[in-house]
Image (cartoon, grey):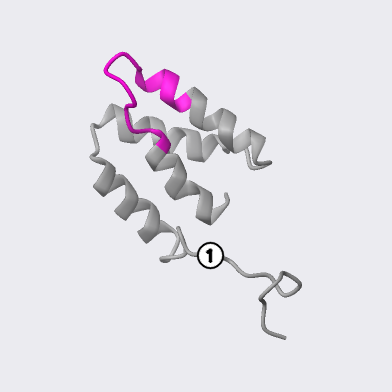
Amino acid sequence: MAFAGISGMVAAMRPTSPKSSHSERLQEAQHLQMLEGNPLTEAELAMFEMFEREGWSHERRRAYIRGAFGGVVGKRLTYRNSPGASA
């Protein structure tokens, strides 16, 4: 799971219109993750389905994900050979 991308998943799951269903939003989010070369695992898919099934708020979802990954979610990761990385 790309830690920086999972916060985007939560945002992507927000309804963009009253007509968009949960399954449509989840499919769109899955497609975006696949385009980024980071498709959802079965466990991640089950997690997002649980959020919807149990009616979790977006704030609660974010807190759960951040807690599960030790606060790494949403932080910019810098790799040794990337521009701006310290030697």
The magenta stretch is 12-26
Where on the picture, by quarter, is residue 19? top left
- Residue at image coords 62%, 70%: 78
Name the spot of residue 55 as percent of width and height, x first: 23, 32
Q: 35 or 83, which lies in front?
A: 83
Name the spot of residue 37 as percent of width and height, x first: 68, 41
Give the residue number, with chain letter if any, for mark 1.
Answer: 76
Name the spot of residue 70 as percent of width and height, x first: 42, 66
The residue sitting at the front extreme is 84
Helix, strand or loop for the magenta stretch, by majority: loop
The residue sitting at the top extreme is 19
Q: Is residue 35 above or below residue 67?
A: above
Q: Image quadrant for the C terminus? A: bottom right
Q: Is residue 22 above or below residue 76?
A: above
Seen in the image, is 28 located left or right of residue 64? right
- Residue at image coords 25%, 48%: 59
Seen in the image, is 40 located left or right of residue 16? right
Q: Residue 45 lies in magenta, yes or no?
A: no
Q: 73 or 11, which lies in front?
A: 11
Name the spot of residue 38 as percent of width and height, x first: 64, 42
- Residue at image coords 54%, 31%: 30
- Residue at image coords 24%, 38%: 56
Seen in the image, is 76 located left or right of residue 66? right
